[in-house]
Amino acid sequence: MNLKIIYPIPKSQSQFYRIFRIIMRYTFIIAALACAIVNICVKGKAWSIVVIWSLISLWQLLFSLKIMEFSIYSHATRITFYLSVLLILIDYLLAPGWARTVLPIVLFAYLLVMFILYFALRDKRDRHILSIFILGLFSMIAIPYSIDHFPITNWIAFSFSLASVVLFIILVIINFKNIIYEIKVRFKTNRIKK
Amino acid sequence: MSNKKLENELTELKIDLDDVSRNMVDEFFNELNKRINLPFVAKEQLINDYLKAFRYYLNNNYKVKKIVKLLDLNNLGDFYAHNERRYLELDNAAIVYPLGMRQHEMPMFRLGVKLKEVVCPELLQIALDITIKRFPGFVCTVKSGFFWHYLETNNNPIQIEEEKDIPCKPISRLSRTYRSFRVLYYKKRISIEFFHVLTDGTGGLVFLKTLLREYFNLKGIKVPIEKGILDINGIVNEEELENEFKKAKGDSDFNTFVDHSSLQLKGKRINAPMSKIVHFILETDKLKEVSKKYSGTITAYICAIMFLAAKPCIKQKEGLFNIQIPINMRKFNNSKTLKNYSMYFNASVDIKNVHDKETLVKEISKQIKEKGSYESMHKMMVTTGKIINSLSFVPKFLKNIVLQLVYGSFANSMIGSTLSNVGLVDMPEEMKKEIDMVYFLLSPGYPNRASATMASINNKTLFTVIKNSDDDTFENNIYDLLKEDGLKVELEGSIDYES
């Protein structure tokens, strides 16, 4: 059976990424399990949770990109979310106090970058406002976090948190209509009323 | 024009023209500029499309007056002037696709035509620029809601691409103009690949025919608006965006979804949408005659051929082999929707009873009549609606987990192969004269090793087998079986993508 070839011959695709992804998946799983087992055996602080979360974060950010709606905004939001949770875990499980200063700085830095991008990339901003809004809301946790043990407040953290709030409020005011629209459509259930 | 490069190109375009023509060109591009209110890069892209088309015409000795008439800017309407964000829900058939998708997978299908002349990409691009405004359901990106995915319109222009890769490859979400379909050209072929969330074969054909009409118009071939072609300057009919499944009321039966698992063809699957394409080009008249000889329709006859060809490719000696046959629901109620509106049933035969064409055609015809009946399909639609309704308030991430487990392995394991027939593609005579063949491709879902499609035009039926396996026995058997019935078979296809 001889075929007349009518389709272009594709360039040979490198299988490197696919194979690398498979190897990394099993490496991560084995590493996570090994850490959990060793941690249980040697007891002490629950450092394995920090390691496992770090592995999950790396996997999600490098090897499991969003299938839908991948954008610079959504990816930055995801990075900040995983990093923030990691900092909170470190604070509670390993080194209390240290992350209390770093977390508000990270969240402020994120909001500042988003703020700049928002004005720089005019064409895309309206469509990605919800991811900024959600992480903006999340960043509000930095406030109670930074004023923990009041009145011995971490003033650096508190200042950054306050700056985040201001940035967030400005973004919400400018985008109030868009945010309402986004919330409406994102939470539609498509339910048929009987 | 704001861009220096475009300014220069425009100046270059006018070099050999007389003053009157120069003024006309200036007026044309000023008017174009006024009609576009897009982000900088997108605007540049659209103006560049028109510059290229203008150059193409000038190189082919068209007069400027004629060019301005052919590239009539009224065809752009105000589509690129207002960035309207419109929410469109996914229909009940589409809703499952993004939920069940894994990394590097996307359910895609391709519709295309082979023209009698080599495709002119400059004019195809303009045809696309002016056609998409009539299809708001297609100029969409898929977005993530809390409960479901949904579509949102986006008026950034879409660039046609030269075909270079394996057909039906997932659309890259990293692309700046990421959309849910792509238009490709290769030599004499124009193809459109759709992400299945947008539409089914019938909806896709309406888009293809409308795009082709505009392409031929730009080439100076007048084609009337008839036989499923839409007027690009007409008002969008809301019925075209309707989720027809929601209208289905009545009794449901969950059993309509559950079927016995199917045997699978042997062979190693490759990590790509397909491993090989084989087109069997048949004469429609002869095919009809042969099908009639066995007292069946073309679909029943080809389905029987597939069962016979599959038998030697299955390891097991007994057990059901299921071929999924989509049914276009529009034939029951003349719906105008361009969204998915097809249901499916499985033609099942125990592989130990697969012996001869006569018995098989009879059995399949009986099953098409019973399982493919309106009552049966309607029941399935009602059931789908009820299942989706009951999952309305379940957060999407939970549905994702369940469907990723169920959709890939469980649902597709009930299917051994698919036979999708878009039938005789009806087009105006003026268009038919310019077209040689119609192509239809559908990549086999996991764990299937083959799917098949059919489309006919100008007394040519293209029966296509799309493989995802390293075993050639199935298509070789089909060839022998068709030859056995005295059919003249021409063969076309792709290389083995695995090698």
Image (cartoon, helix red, strand yellow):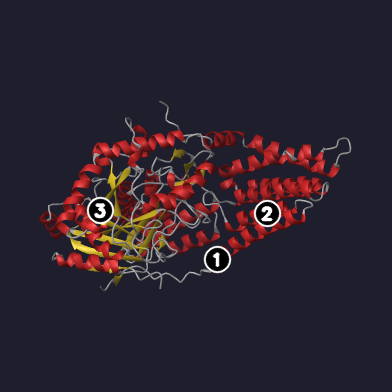
Judged left or right of residue B41, residue B452 is left
Q: Are marks 2 and 1 on the same chain?
A: yes
Q: Chain of mark 1?
A: A
Real-space Cα distance between discs 2 and 1?
A: 23 Å
Real-space Cα distance between discs 1 and 3?
A: 41 Å
Real-space Cα distance between discs 2 and 3?
A: 50 Å
The image quarter in which residue B432 lies: bottom left
Above-or-below relation of B458 to A181: below
Q: Secondary structure at mark 3?
A: strand
Is residue B116 among what the camera can see? no
Which residue in the protein does label 3 denote? Answer: B349
> What's under tag 2, amino acid-wise?
Ile
> What's under tag 3, amino acid-wise?
Val
| Quarter placement of the C terminus of chain B | bottom left
Residue depicted at x 77% and y 38%: A143
Disc with the residue nearer the chain's start (2 vs 1): 1
Q: Residue furthest right?
A: A152
Q: Nearer the viewer, residue A20 or B313?
A: B313
Residue B3 percent coordinates (x, y): 54, 57
Which residue in the protein does label 1 denote? Answer: A17
Q: Chain of mark 3?
A: B
Q: Nearer the viewer, residue B259 or B77?
A: B259
Residue A10 percent coordinates (x, y): 42, 69
Judged left or right of residue A47, residue A8 is left
Q: Are marks 2 and 3 on the same chain?
A: no
Q: Chain of mark 2?
A: A
Which residue in the protein does label 2 denote? Answer: A52
Above-or-below relation of B52 to A156: below
Residue depicted at x 51% and y 70%: A14
